[in-house]
Amino acid sequence: ARHPVIRVMDPLVQAALQALSGVHAPDASHPAMAALESLQPGAVLQGLVHAVRYAADLSIRITAITLLRNSLFAHTRSLWVNTERPVQVAVQADLIAAMDDVQSPELHAQLLSTIGHLAAAAEANNMDTEDDGETYFWPQLLERVHALVITPARRLDAFAILREAPSAYAKGPGGFQELADLLAASIASANSELQRAAVATLPPLLGAYDMHSQAPFSTLALGVLFVAQNFITHGNTNDAEEVLLAIRELCTIAPVFFESHISGTITALAAIGGTASASTCRVPAVEAAINLIELLPDPARRVAGIIPMMVDVCVKMMMDVTMDDPDWLDPADLVANNTSLTTFSLRSLDRLATLLGGRNSWHTS
């Protein structure tokens, strides 16, 4: 009641939005941008979020969400920082309400990203403070994300926010174990979009917390690998690449995620690197495996035949040269074409050699 949902837009903000509609990446020199700069920050914020919800013209709504996002996350964040707390709370409430109003897929995606970024910035910069000075984390968003993630039809929305602001669930009522269970259900579902979204949520989520907090998620490791393998089996190369890139990131920022299943993980990634038809899948798979070996050397050494297996994969990739690349043996060409499978394989072999302790270990390998 203290902070009613915004229903009125400043006419000057409305006129500026109409002038900016359809303008690609307007800068500060645009007259309409200058007009917005001259207004009170609170009035601009209220006007932008009002337009996102209620403007009849979709292009104006998209312009408004773009400006809103840019104004919130520019290096100065002048609009948000210079707006009074009651208006900030009203804007937050209206953004949450807009999640049910916005029907355009493009606008909806930008709205979720904006909410996530605002939540992350609010926590990182202590924008949200109680009167006694203690920080808190957008409590209405905690409640809403929890409601979304336990509702299968809205889980994609929750994952989109969690990718930007992992803390939006951990401080809520469900905690880590419930979220891990919901991610597991999504990964095991028959919905490929939900599978991809769940896997993509894991790197920022695990990267934000300590090893103890990561523990409930370790049971998801084999499921994540199965999703990648299943996409490859069914020829869904783009989906497989997206999942493998997330796996590569997980192997870098949260290697303990795979520690309990390190043998199966490295074997599966090596198999993808050696047999997948698309180089866009082979490269992240091999890189993920080597990252894991580097970051978990002791558990990795206990995997039988791990180095010969990885060397074999790298050599196979090195030999996978197409007829339209006749100069691949030219050292100068290798340096210039540093994204080729050949160059990637050579670098991977270098990394494996380093793991073995140098060239003296190569003979045994």
Image (tube, rainbow, N blue to C red):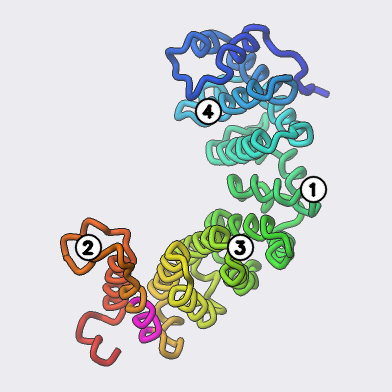
Image location (x, y in percent) of residue 223: 64, 71
Q: Please report contact status of discs 2 and 3: CB closer than 8 Å, yes or no.
A: no
Location of residue 9 by image quarter: top right
Q: With respect to residue 33, does 124 lie above or below?
A: below
Asked whether the viewer can see residue 134, the reply is no
Q: Which mark is residue 334?
A: 2
The region drawn magenta spans: 307-314
Q: Which residue is mark 4?
A: 70
Secondary structure that dominates the magenta span = helix
Sooner in the amino-acid sequence: mark 4 or mark 3: 4
Element marked by disc 1: helix
Instruction: From the viewer's perspective, tell me whether residue 204 is left or right of residue 198.
Output: left
Image location (x, y in percent) of residue 259: 52, 76
Q: Which residue is at the front of the view, 280 or 135?
A: 280
Rendered residue at 66%/41% (across/down):
137
Q: Which residue is mark 3?
A: 213
Instruction: From the viewer's perspective, tell me whether residue 89 is left or right of residue 298.
Output: right
Sooner in the amino-acid sequence: mark 4 or mark 1: 4
Disc 2 versus disc 3: distance between alpha carbons?
43 Å
Please identify the quadrant where the N terminus is shown.
top right
Q: With respect to residue 118, does 83 lie above or below?
A: above
Q: Which residue is mark 1?
A: 147
Q: Which residue is at the front of the view, 110 or 163?
A: 110
Label 4: how many residues lie within 10 Å, few (<14), some (14-19) or many (20+)? some
Q: Please report contact status of discs 4 and 3: CB closer than 8 Å, yes or no.
A: no
Instruction: From the viewer's perspective, tell me whether residue 236 is left or right of residue 5.
Output: left
Q: Which residue is at the front of the view, 274 or 82?
A: 274
Sooner in the amino-acid sequence: mark 2 or mark 3: 3
Q: Nearer the viewer, mark 3 or mark 1?
A: 1
Which amino acid type is shown beneath numbered disc 3? Ser
Q: Please report contact status of discs 2 and 4: CB closer than 8 Å, yes or no.
A: no
